[in-house]
Image (cartoon, rainbow, N blue to C red):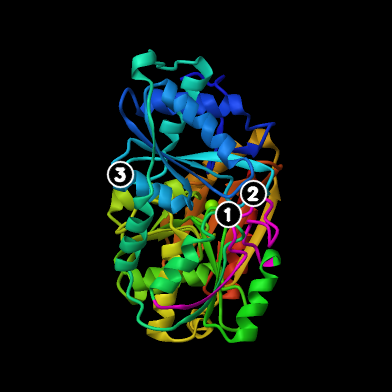
Amino acid sequence: MTSEIPKLFGTSGIRGKIGYDITLELAVDIGRAIASYAGGVGSKIVLGYDSRTSNVMMENAVTAGLLQCGCHVLKIGMAPTPLVGYATMKLKADTGVMITASHNPPEYNGIKLWNPDGMAYKQDQERTIEEIIYKKNFKTVSWENIGKVEEIKYVVSDYVTDIINQTNIKHGIKVVVDCANGAASYLSPLILRKVGCSVIAINSQPDGFFPGRLPEPSEKNLGELMEIVKSIGADIGIAHDGDADRMIAIDEKGFVADFDKLLALVCRESGGTVVTTVDASLCTDKCMDEVGGHVIRTKVGDVHVAEAIENNNAQFGGEPSGTWLHPNFCMCPDGILSALRVIELIQKYGPLSEQLDAIPNYPTIRDKVNCENSQKKLIMESVKAKLHIILEDVVDVNPIDGVRISMVDSSWVLIRPSGTESFIRITLEATTIGKAYMIRDQCKEFIEGLL
Ligand code: MG
């Protein structure tokens, strides 16, 4: 495939400002391209959207493109991303389309695509869609084969039933949930209540202006939630992003739960083989050691986590960002099921803050070495070939995303060229502060020696 074909997909679907990057013309073309790639006459495409002001406009444009190429559109309306992934699987559809810009501000929108098993489109599939759009290779059909639209209502109750059957929660855990006025505004509080939690829901009226808080669940946007959890004595606070494929937990003291430690707790409970990304903390490895489990590392991005889960038959996988996959349920990241998993832990082992405190802190260092863009490739090749000889007790060199070198005690260092600036970045975590400085110095010296 030629490289002049412009990239439309980023790390998580196509995303941009409505009317600028994301136009109606593009939305129609995306519909045509999906139908031309995954569809054909009579095939079924699930279509849902989040709470943005541009949602129905985008839905209609994508629908027009799909119908023109003979696909039947199964509309599920406003839905969190995990419901679109689930519905694609449950309804045996050929592709799922989620219209969302996830955690981006209100003026954004985008599109994310899902395979029949609920897994996100892989990079080669996205590239095929880009090529079809660029070359306008649309398989339009004649008047008698134009697709039909069906509104599917029952899939929501199937999702609620199936997700509840996945969980084991017995009694009144006190939960405050903040849905960011996003796509899970009805569903997440409903499911939490149905499993037996005592629920206070805030920002849980869908609203594309996001009047409660911005859809990014970062600490600066969660002040209200943290305050309420603490003041009413709740066991946990849950914050979703705009499309609820993610969740962030607040402990009973009102603090944001450390992302890496929370992930480590859930990995340990899952046991077996788990997947996480190259930048996740070694506390996951330590927790998995306790239960005789195994950690697989992938590139940053939930699609890569999903692929590694599939290839290694893993029980669980997640990124420290709070995007977690539960393959026994569906291959689409699910922030509602993730919340239920954390609630199960609280019920089983007690207060969340105590569980998190029991996980050790490891010294982390982030540093960088100046490096011109033109030199980055050569430097990274040397890092991959030789750095492990200099460092002590190396057990693994993983070149999947930069170069990640791990040592026998699970200390690790990740060397990555910055994508936007003239730096090589060094990120590391070690079992002692002395060891952290030693690894940092050895890496810096090695890279500077190459310049
Ligand atoms: Mg999201």
Q: Does residue 298 show up?
A: no
> Label 3 amino acid?
Leu
Mark 3 or 1: the one toward you: 3
Specify the farthest residue to the top.
Answer: 142
Q: Which residue is drawn at 38% across and 73% down?
A: 195
* Mark 1 CB near ligand 1 (8 Å cut): yes
Q: Residue at x 36, y 47 (%)?
A: 87
Task: Tell me whether the residue at label 2 lies in contact with that at label 3, contact meaning CB atoms closer than 8 angstroms.
Answer: no
Q: Does the magenta stretch include residue 217?
A: yes
Q: State which quadrant residue 46 falls in.
A: top left
Q: Does residue 349 show up?
A: yes
Could you give the CA–CA distance between mark 3 and mark 1, rounded to whole angstroms? Answer: 24 Å
> Label 2 amino acid?
Asn
Pointer 2 residue: 104
Pointer 1 residue: 242
In the image, is 98 to the left or to the right of 18?
left
> Label 1 amino acid?
Gly
Task: Tell me whether the residue at label 2 lies in contact with that at label 1, contact meaning CB atoms closer than 8 angstroms.
Answer: yes
Q: Does the magenta stretch include residue 172?
A: no
- Label 2 or label 3, whichever comes before in sequence order: 3
Q: State which quadrant residue 363 falls in.
A: bottom right
Per the rendered image, the range of residues in magenta is 196-219
Q: Residue at x 63, y 56 (%)?
A: 215
Task: Tell me whether the residue at label 3 lies in contact with that at label 1, contact meaning CB atoms closer than 8 angstroms.
Answer: no
